[in-house]
Image (tube, coloured by chain):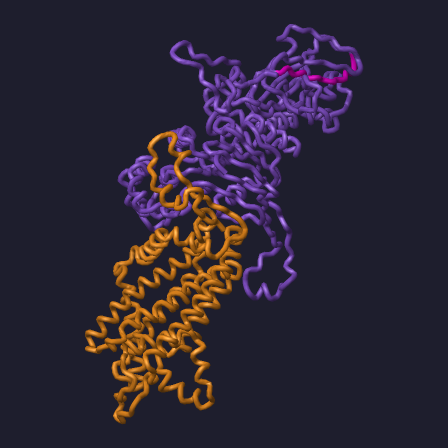
Chain colours: A orange, B purple
Amino acid sequence: MALEAPAQPPDAGTAGVTSVLTGEGSIATRPKTTRVVSAHTSVLARLKEIWRARELLVYLVRTEIKVKYKNSVLGLLWSMVSPALTLAVYTMVFGVFLKNGMPNFVIYLFSGLLLWNFFSTGILTATGVVVNNAGLVKKVSFPREILALAAIGSAGVFFFFQACVMVIFMVALQWAPAWPLLYLVLVALVPTLVLSCALGILLAAVNVYMRDTQHLVTVLVGSAWFWACPIVYSFQETLAPRLAAHGLGWLYFLNPLTILVMTYQRVLYGRLTVHSTEPTHAVLHILPHWPVTTYLWGDGVVLVFAAALFYVAMGVFGRLAGNFAEEL
Amino acid sequence: MGSQAVEVQGVSKRFRLYHEKYTSLKERVIHAGRIPYQDLWALRDVGFDVREGETLGILGRNGSGKSTLLKCICGVLQPTSGQVVVRGKLAGLLELGAGFQQELSGRENIYLNGSMLGLSKREVDRMFDDIVEFAELGQFIDNQVKFYSSGMYVRLGFAVAVNVDPDVLVIDEVLAVGDERFQRKCMERVKQFQREGRTILFVSHAPDLVRNLCDRAVVLADGEMVGMGAPGEAVRLFRERLLEAGDVLGAREAEGALDVASEEAPALAEGSDPIAPAGVGLAPAPMAAVASSAASATSDPAGAAIVPGTEPGLAQGAEARTHNGPGDSRPVRLVEVSSVLPTTSTRRYLLPGEPLTIRVAFESTRAVEGVVFQLDIRNDEGLGLFSTDTEALGVRCDVQPGPGTFEFRLESVPLLDGAYDVNLGVQTSSGLSDWREPACRFEVMNPGRSTGAVAIPVQAALVGGGALSVARDGLAVPADGTVVR
């Protein structure tokens, strides 16, 4: 699409923009950036352009959040109320009707859901974002990836609010996380972010050409992928023994989100084994007995995978973006 | 590099037109590999440079690729091949207020829009007051944009774009918005940009605006660049192209849009002729009246449909021709009326001030004395510009039976751009004998910069107090630019 590269004086970009118009001659003499619009632009150039437009990203995120809760009485509070309600439902189901015996199941659930919500809201909104902003895409020039990134960004803001709710829950239930491992929260967040961006950018572009994508993603992510992650159930307790019997334990970890979700549970739920709340008081194996390095490695591998996917996504987006304006 | 602000290098743009658009997966699978499509080249190898500080116009009729070209320059569309190099910050006005978010307030939208145009918050802070003042929004700035009137919306859009301090400003037909005062303000700002040495790319199908504002202009036709040059030349080329395409209607349309708003409308309103304002809608009504009254006057269905002489007004030429009985009361018939241009060249239009001859071939069934030829010239809005007849001119014509030729020789046609209709009538002592409307048509193209309806020779002179300045394109302005060759 459009590539900006500093012209004659290096770093003319910032200098040119800030120079104040003082007299008639200044327009001609002030340093300028050169922009090339052509059919092929490298991924690196596109990344640079996105970096240049980072302030726009902030505005778009802010706009999205503002618009979402404009004219609603509770406003931003909704972003906290809705996960709390989801939690209440799941807690009712698995704590009262289909008892799984996990003490403070709500904390376990929330630690997985926290990360999952970030991921799923992000890519779900990102998928439709180019189509929904057709008016903008057709008339205004800016790196279109920003739109997808803004969707992920606003999901990130909601992640933050939900994390606050999580803290409130933990304090209320007097549940301590694994304090020494707290840094893993950030370690797992980075691959999730990169993965969301990669998928968001990819899907946003594909959706312009095949509007099915939106529906497909809703179905796949909303149900299949969600249940493929150990969020409402414990992998170690339910699936691991059965898969291990066939030597297929690795299969489960092909889902890049599994290890990330488990990292969160490791930190926030913090218990590997617990005693069931059922009268039997049986021992429940909630999480595998892995050393911390396993989580670090796991997250690292996902990060590498996500980064590779991001590069591919940028490439695909770059190829497709040129015709967005005519396809919409 | 150096002084080129925009370099358009061999830009082509292909659109795939699918006869049926399949965007769902099912349809794609079903029709895989055999989706019928047509290639449409909206732009073909267009290349030109825009110098820094220059105002370049892009002329072309609808569908000629103007907007596609602008979108490629702005970066909204990617060219299929070729590239555009833009030096400096570009602000595109493809559509005013395109980036506005309905739910946000005007204030928030200014920041959003500013960042879309590549400004930091600090820079927008600095321009904020100017923008609000220019947009004349006052206290409404904190209202949601969705409650704005369309005028406020558009004003805000324009205000943001022109206040962001761009090096290159791209304007796509958006100057025709807002009320007259705001339009003037926009033009004033555009002119200020010119003085400040900013580069402006300007698309319009209003030749007058291009003539007025631009230093050079590019003419596009069917995606190809057919010419580039001084605005007068370009406008001439543009209108020539329209004529070639046999699209006189297109030419008139092109004249219409903005001219009506800016120049001709006031002229029309101020016209001393009380009929003038209604001129546009005037033509069909009387004709209908003639037809109906004629029908009612007819007693013999097989005989003459129109009783000549009882309707001295506007008997339609076509109707008159269909009636082919010898009709003793209508002896003189028009055979052909043509406008004869003075030059022997292939030019199909007149320059302002050139002479024109209207040649009338007629036929008479008998010898008639005191035949009166009537001439009536109207512009494309039906406004009467000039009417005369041989009686008024004090010329007496006696015709012999058989064919004959008569000429009105206009010494000078002091008109500016436009397509003009010539109506012609023949009257004998017994009434109107034949009438054609329009009998023929001629075009005037103005190579100079002046605009309006009438070519008035003018001299510009500074009488003391300084030296005569030189025109923008480096030529001293002769007369008014009417350049009578």
**Magenta residues, start to end:** B354-366
Residue A223, above or below B139: below
Q: Nearer the viewer, residue B313 or B402?
A: B402
Residue A321 in the image: x percent, y percent? 50, 55
Q: Nearer the viewer, residue B437 or B452?
A: B452
Is residue B361 in the magenta section? Answer: yes
Q: Quadrant of residue A87?
A: bottom left
Residue B251, above or below A294: above
- Image quadrant occupied by the C terminus of chain B: top right
Q: Is residue B158 visible?
A: no
Q: Is residue B376 visible?
A: yes
Q: Who's the residue at 69% across and 27% down the image?
A: B318
From the viewer's perspective, tell me whether residue B59 is left or right of residue A173: right
Name of the residue lying farthest toward the front: A9
Name of the residue lying farthest toward the right: B402
Residue B385 in the image: x percent, y percent? 56, 18
Residue B410 in the image: x percent, y percent? 64, 13
Is residue B142 in the magenta section? Answer: no
Q: Quadrant of residue A69?
A: bottom left
Magenta stretch secondary structure, dominant: strand
Residue A224, above or below B18: below
Q: Quadrant of residue B24?
A: bottom right
From the viewer's perspective, tell me whether residue B239 is left or right of residue A81: right
